[in-house]
Image: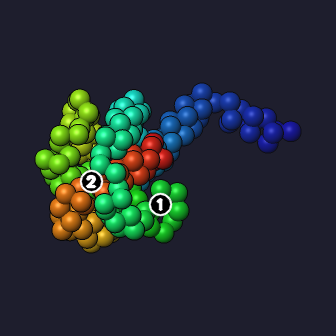
Amino acid sequence: MKKADRLLQFSMSPTIMVRMSALTLFISLIAGVVVTATAGQAVTCRREIPGELIRELWNRTNALINKLPKEERFSRRLRLLPKFCTKCSERSIGWLELQNIIDIYQASVFSRAVIKKFLPQHYDELLYRLHHTLQHCVSSSKHSKYSKTIKKMARKIKKRRDEGALKAVREFSFILRWIDELM
């Protein structure tokens, strides 16, 4: 009986309870830091990019695609975007790859005169907001494991000039879908 009484006294001691709660808090904070350090980039980008921005870009991109000349003149088999996946382990795309692709689109696609004349009102501003947000939430010190693939895509767009830019605009909805799936 005396051992049970001492155990009960020991577990009820206020100092022990304070120490145990402090230890629990400390362990949970460390666990939170580890989880945040590994998934911090994804959490930040998910939080930073407003869903309304993606919806507005989606609507205006569809309007832009409808304004473009019909695709019969261009090669339908030509695919500019690499085959990425947001939910599978192989060929998975992340925020870093999306930032690189958006950079290429701003420099090589949406800046071309053949595309500029079809752009809906305020489209550039929406793209700038997306570009700026990605730059803010993605660490630029890292290099993508798909950088060669993304550079190859950029070369394809530049090589095909206006035809490549028109095709790239038609494929921009895939990029917006990838962003939406990562959110």
- The answer to whether residue 5 of the structure is visible from this angle is yes
Task: Please give the residue where the numbered disc 1 appears in the rendered image.
Answer: 85
User: What residue is rendered at 43% in x and 62% in y?
Assistant: 84
152 or 46: which is nearer to us? 152
Task: Please give the residue where the numbered disc 2 appears in the rendered image.
Answer: 166
Question: Up-down: is 23 above or below 39?
Answer: above
Question: Up-down: is 177 above or below 63?
Answer: below
- The answer to whether residue 95 of the structure is visible from this angle is no
Mark 1 surroundings: few (<14), some (14-19) or many (≥20) residues within 10 A: some
Separation (CA) of disc 2 from disc 1: 23 Å
Question: Up-down: is 3 above or below 174?
Answer: above
- Determine whether label 2 and label 1 are within 8 Å by CB: no
Left or right, 111 with respect to 149, comes to: left
Q: Quadrant of residue 164?
A: bottom left
Mark 2 surroundings: few (<14), some (14-19) or many (≥20) residues within 10 A: many
Q: Amino acid at mark 2?
A: Leu
What percent of the width, then of the height, locates residue 114?
Answer: 17, 48
User: What residue is rendered at 24% in x and 68% in y?
Assistant: 156
**Which quarter of the rendered picture does the N terminus lie within?**
top right
User: Considering the numbered disc 1 on the image, is that residue within a helix, a strand or a loop?
Assistant: loop
